[in-house]
Amino acid sequence: MLFVANWKMQKTLDQSIQFVQKHIDALKALNRQIILCPSFPALYPLSQLLENSSVFLGAQDCSPHELGAYTGQVSAQSLAEVGCTYCIVGHSERRNYNKESNSEIAQKATQLLHQNIIPIVCVGESQQEFEKKQSIDVLHNQLEPVFKVIESQSSASTVCIAYEPIWSIGTGNVPDTQYLQNIFDTLKEWCSAKTSKTKYTLLYGGSVTGENIQQFYQVENIDGFLIGGSSLDFQKLKKIVS
Ligand code: PGA
């Protein structure tokens, strides 16, 4: 099981450092695959603090370009140099506020794969799409360009796909087990139909807490979780992970 803490822009640089300094031993003692994703300025100091530990470092976004005149963007190579092994791309907040397209997100995944960073590609439907029963179509459209670039890579790679229904993010509303089972069965089927070169890991994200985690374990094919709000507090994160 993989536990990805998406800190979004919720912790400052100092708060991110303090969290790791205070909890690094307890994090290691949990003995689980945990990935901390702070904002960009915290990546370097955290990479120093997490060095030689079992806790991994992830970024929250990267540029779709290799390098060049792209003010404000951060390249996948810089993320690799700073010690990231994972990077979230296509989070619904970026799709929404930064108008990121599916093909741009696929380009970001490509840049990451070139640097041996595992992309965590976020997909998910809106409330309206959910109500109109369009979820599977939405996921298909979001993932097709990503599958295309991944499958064109010559070397073996690992890719995480995080299913995060937008209506569940930060709301406390979570999909029921049967609905999730159908989604994860579909995702699994799509991934299995791809070449065996790529290893796909499927995550669920959206209002995951220590209180509701058990219900997700009833769903087959969920390999881990992308956790926002509940990852900010160590005790809450610990409850989920353990
Ligand atoms: P949440 O966020 O756990 O606060 O719902 C999840 C996410 O946005 O990745």
Image (tube, grey):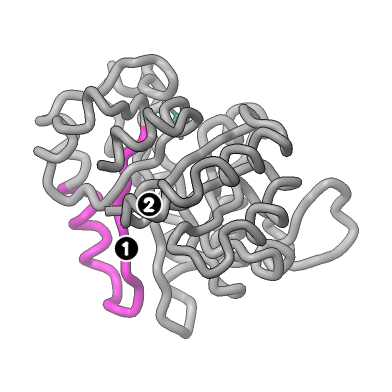
Q: Which residues are magenta?
A: 185-205
For residue 5, side relative to residue 14 (left or right): left
Q: Residues within 10 Å of mark 1 (few under 14, many from 20)?
A: some
Residue 186: image location, x then y, percent: 19, 48
Residue 126: image location, x then y, percent: 41, 23
Q: Which residue is mark 2?
A: 161
Q: Which residue is mark 1?
A: 200
The label on residue 48 is: none
| Residue 230 sits above or below residue 79 on the image | above
Residue at 53 percent across and 44 percent down: it is: 90
Q: Residue 28: within the magenta?
A: no
Q: Nearer the viewer, residue 16 or 109?
A: 16
Residue at 18 percent across and 57 percent down: it is: 189
Q: Residue 194: within the magenta?
A: yes
Q: Secondary structure at mark 2?
A: strand
Q: Nearer the viewer, residue 153 or 241?
A: 241
Q: Nearer the viewer, residue 187 or 223?
A: 223
Residue at 42 percent across and 48 percent down: it is: 27
For residue 114, side relative to residue 138 (left or right): right
Q: Quadrant of ligand 1?
A: top left
The type of residue carrying mark 2 is Ile
The type of residue carrying mark 1 is Tyr
